[in-house]
Image (tube, rainbow, N blue to C red):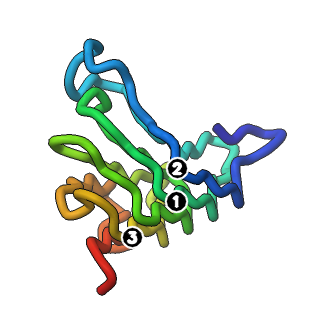
Amino acid sequence: PNDTTGYVNENTFTAGRYAHKSAEGDSVSGTRQILLDHPSTGVRCNNNRFMGACIEGDVPQYHVECYGTSNLFHWCRWESSHPRISWNQLTSTDRARDNLVWGGTSSSSIVETNAANTTGLNKVKTGLE
């Protein structure tokens, strides 16, 4: 996560599997595969790219929880019976925005949860449209 001495920006993550052991349960409260955090320091995670990652399983409450901006999930594999993303906010004006899920296996199954002020600011594109 970001803190007062640094931030997580401009990284490219290629491939890889993001998962928890299935024995941990289903939709376990507080678990995330990917957390793009936004602590009270006011420094957002931004411009990170996840290329072809395999985001697996039903254990996490959210497969991705994002407070950041301009992050890209490009042709990832959403290998879950119910993949979930939470677009979140710290304040009503400081919120997840301009994030994009672009295609990928089962991207059409993603269930988005939008904080009150993030609706319409992020996009899940299920193909090349």
Q: In the displayed structure, would residue 98 be above or below residue 33?
A: below
Residue type, label 3:
Trp
Q: In the displayed structure, would residue 19 be above or below residue 116?
A: above
* Secondary structure of residue under mark 3: strand
Quarter of the rendering occupied by the C terminus: bottom left
Q: Are marks 3 and 2 in contact (CB under 8 Å)?
A: no
Report the Cα–Cα distance between label 1 and label 3.
Answer: 10 Å
Task: Please name the residue that numbered disc 1 is placed on.
Answer: 51
**Residue 15 bears which disc, if any?**
2
Extreme-bottom residue of the structure: 129
Residue drawn at (52%, 59%) of the image: 51
Extreme-right residue of the structure: 5
Q: Which of marks 3 and 2 is nearer the N terminus?
A: 2
Residue drawn at (17%, 44%) of the image: 82
Q: Earlier in the sequence, mark 1 or mark 2?
A: 2
x then y, percent, for residue 104: 33, 63
x then y, percent, for residue 67: 50, 52
Task: Please name the residue that numbered disc 3 is placed on.
Answer: 102
Mark closer to the observer (1, 3): 1
Q: In the displayed structure, would residue 129 be above or below residue 17?
A: below
Q: Please indicate whether residue 83 sits to the left or right of residue 15 in the image.
A: left
Disc 2 packing (10 Å; few <14; some 14–19; many ≥20) = some
Give the camera-side residue of 83 and 75.
Answer: 75
x then y, percent, for residue 93: 50, 64
Report the Cα–Cα distance between label 1 and label 2.
Answer: 6 Å
Give the camera-side residue of 32 and 17.
Answer: 17
